[in-house]
Image: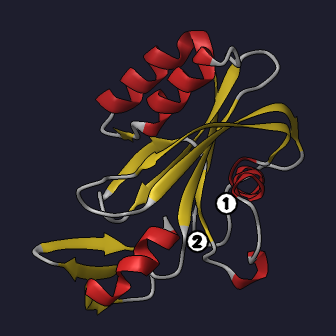
Amino acid sequence: MIHRLNKAMSEIEVLYEGTYLGLYKNGHWEYALRPNASACVTILPITDTGEVVLVEQFRIPTQSRVIEIPAGLVGDEPEYTGETLAECAARELLEETGYCAGKITELIASPTSAGMTPEITHMFAATDLNKVHAGGGVEGENITVHVVPSSELDHFLAQKHSEGYDIDFKIHASLYKAQELGLL
């Protein structure tokens, strides 16, 4: 993705760049991009007993609590320069949930929102999990961890939705791919 963007940089007009988000124009189209990250990773944690580990956090743009799979940005922190996508996914999993993955499996890579950003989300599954701490994310994230039996997942998500939570669609996309690969 970065290569595609670098080739077209001469055609891009910077409308605004902040710390975490930039707004750009290419021809007649305006779009957003994170100036401090090269990609996004998500990870679907699956326990040995078939439970799915989800996270919950308040998201400022939606002004709501959102049920998600662990996720993070690639290249946004200098201390992790050179980290692979899978390494980033494993690090985010540990930070947010407290689980260390014995195995990371690539599921799919897809545009996050193709009409709004060139960002690509790289989705992974994590298996052979070992709980090493409580999770909760880094300072300021205030993440709540939910471990849900896969047989109760639909009910759990429906209940959270009825309580006013937003449900991230990446849960469903990663579940579909994990089931397709026989991981769940």
Provide the residue designation for mark 2: 140
Residue 43 picture location, percent across and down: 64, 43
**Quadrant containing the C terminus in the rendered view:** top right
Whether residue 85 is visible here, answered yes or no, is yes
Q: Which numbered tag is attached to residue 137?
A: 1
Instruction: State the SS at label 1.
Output: loop
In this rendering, would 92 be left or right of 167? right
Snapshot quadrant of residue 58: bottom left
Report the number of discs.
Answer: 2
Residue 35 picture location, percent across and down: 45, 82
Q: Residue at the top extreme? A: 151
Instruction: State the SS at label 2.
Output: loop
In this rendering, would 175 be left or right of 134? left
Which residue does the image show at 54% across and 63% down from the upper left?
Answer: 39
Q: Nearer the viewer, residue 56 or 115?
A: 115
Q: Are marks 2 and 1 in contact (CB under 8 Å)?
A: yes
| Mark 1, other Cα within 10 Å: few <14 / some 14–19 / many ≥20 | many
Instruction: Tell me the kind of residue under disc 1.
Output: Gly
Q: Residue at the front extreme? A: 7
Which residue does the image show at 43% across and 25% down from the upper left?
Answer: 157
Q: Nearer the viewer, residue 116 or 7?
A: 7
Which residue does the image show at 37% across and 63% down from the upper left?
Answer: 118
Residue 72 picture location, percent across and down: 59, 60
